[in-house]
Image: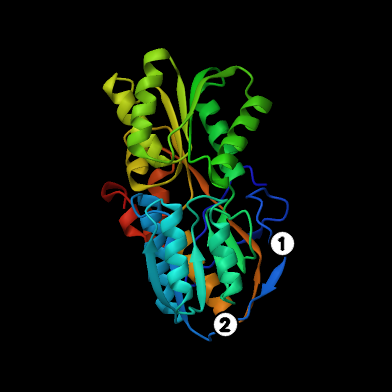
């Protein structure tokens, strides 16, 4: 595990840094660690990527990164949106498999529900890869994502530093049907318990990685706990909802707020002093890596079963540098205008 991560740029021009997950807990998928040599039955250089949602800046950026990289690898990429529906995701996968694409790429709505899509692809002899969230079952050609447990640990340490290692806090959790939400919460809570005993969590509630839900959840929590000192939101979309709730009570910039992902709104809030930090995990870089790995699988190359990408803690001290890094990998859209 890394205590302080460095940013990855995953396009071929910038280079990719990958580390085998090994014993890292990203979920309970059946695929073992080690390399895989996938055979493409159709010989097709097409890929279908089914996104859990495109109503979230993180996943829009993943799509953009994958779409920008795919043509460079000679892949025709078709992106579909499951709209956070398990049944829609399965229907899209079933439809895609009838066309025998070179690879099926999925971002599970739920870790358990995604198993049906994976096993369907296995039966159709179509290689399937997953990213960000890991299916619980089926045989994957490869999986790529960020280390969610380490992300939670980084957030805990950052929040503790912002609080001077004492105070009362709230934890806003993600969609608990996904391994990412479970692992981010696990890492955060374990780190707090082990290293920051003078910080007390007075409320913990899920807001499903959604900005509007986080606003409602945080508004209700503040009614019961108006004197909190800090908040950890498991993604930046929820952090923005939390920030809106804090602002309504004139607490923005006073309550220490830490998020995860590094979306543009969060970077702008950090630069403005309204948010303390985010564990930035470039979704655009993730998308680039998805296309890179998909091309290797389609080409019959050996790939790692599990690949983890590294993130970086971003605070006011380095937010401009991080924004300029995004521009350097082709992701100008996710860098706030005043930080480019």
Spatial separation of the CA atoms under disc 2 and disc 1: 20 Å
Residue drawn at 71 percent across, 61 percent down: 33
Left or right, 264 with reference to 7: left
Is label 2 in a helix, a strand or a loop?
A: loop
Dot 2: within a 10 Å radius of its alpha carbon, few (fewer than 14), some, or many (20 or more) residues? some
- Total marks placed: 2
| Residue 126 locus on image (x, y percent) | 56, 75
Residue drawn at 54 percent across, 53 percent down: 113
Camera sees residue 330: no
Picture disc at residue 33: 1
Q: Nearer the viewer, residue 50 or 56?
A: 50
Q: Is residue 16 above or below residue 207?
A: below
Q: Quadrant of residue 284?
A: bottom left
Left or right, 250 with reference to 299: left
Q: Which residue is mark 2?
A: 299
Q: Nearer the viewer, residue 162 or 147?
A: 147
Left or right, 234 with reference to 195: left
Dot 1: within a 10 Å radius of its alpha carbon, few (fewer than 14), some, or many (20 or more) residues? some
Tell whether label 1 touches label 2 (CB within 8 Å): no
| Residue 95 locus on image (x, y percent) | 43, 71
Left or right, 73 with reference to 145: left
Camera sees residue 53: yes
Query: Quick one: which residue is furthest to the bottom in this view?
Result: 43
Is label 1 in a helix, a strand or a loop?
A: loop
| Residue 17 locus on image (x, y percent) | 58, 62
Residue drawn at 32 percent across, 41 percent down: 268
Q: Nearer the viewer, residue 80 or 291?
A: 80
Q: Nearer the viewer, residue 323 or 71?
A: 71
| Residue 271 locus on image (x, y percent) | 34, 38
């Amino acid at each position: 595990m890394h205590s302080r991560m460095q940013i990855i740029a995953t396009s071929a021009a910038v280079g990719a840094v990958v580390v085998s997950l090994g014993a890292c807990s990203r979920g309970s998928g059946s695929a073992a660690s080690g390399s895989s040599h996938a055979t493409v039955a159709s010989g097709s250089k097409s890929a279908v990527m089914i996104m859990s949602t495109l109503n979230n800046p993180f996943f829009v950026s993943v799509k953009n990164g994958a779409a920008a990289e795919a043509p460079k690898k000679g892949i025709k990429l078709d992106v579909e949106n499951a709209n956070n529906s398990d049944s829609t995701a399965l229907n899209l996968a079933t439809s895609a498999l009838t066309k025998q694409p070179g690879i099926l790429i999925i971002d599970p709505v739920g870790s358990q529900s995604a198993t049906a899509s994976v096993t369907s692809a296995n039966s159709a002899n179509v290689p399937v890869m997953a990213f960000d969230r890991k299916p619980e079952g089926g045989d994957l050609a490869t999986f790529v994502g960020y280390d969610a447990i380490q992300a939670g640990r980084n957030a805990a340490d950052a929040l503790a530093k912002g609080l001077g290692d004492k105070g009362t806090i709230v934890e806003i959790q993600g969609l608990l049907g996904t391994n990412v939400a479970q692992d981010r919460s696990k890492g955060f809570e374990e780190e707090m318990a082990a290293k920051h005993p003078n910080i007390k969590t007075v409320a913990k509630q899920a807001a499903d990685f959604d900005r509007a839900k986080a606003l409602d959840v945080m508004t209700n929590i503040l009614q019961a706990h108006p004197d909190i000192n800090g908040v950890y939101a498991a993604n930046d979309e929820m952090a923005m909802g939390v920030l809106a709730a804090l602002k309504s009570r004139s607490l923005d910039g006073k309550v220490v707020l830490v998020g995860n992902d590094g979306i543009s709104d969060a970077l702008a809030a950090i630069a403005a002093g309204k948010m303390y930090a985010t564990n930035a995990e470039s979704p655009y870089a993730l998308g680039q890596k998805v296309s890179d790995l998909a091309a290797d699988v389609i080409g019959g190359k050996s790939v790692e079963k599990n690949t983890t990408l590294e993130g970086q803690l971003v605070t006011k001290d380095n937010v401009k540098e991080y924004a300029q890094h995004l521009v350097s990998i082709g992701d100008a859209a996710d860098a706030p205008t005043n930080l480019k």
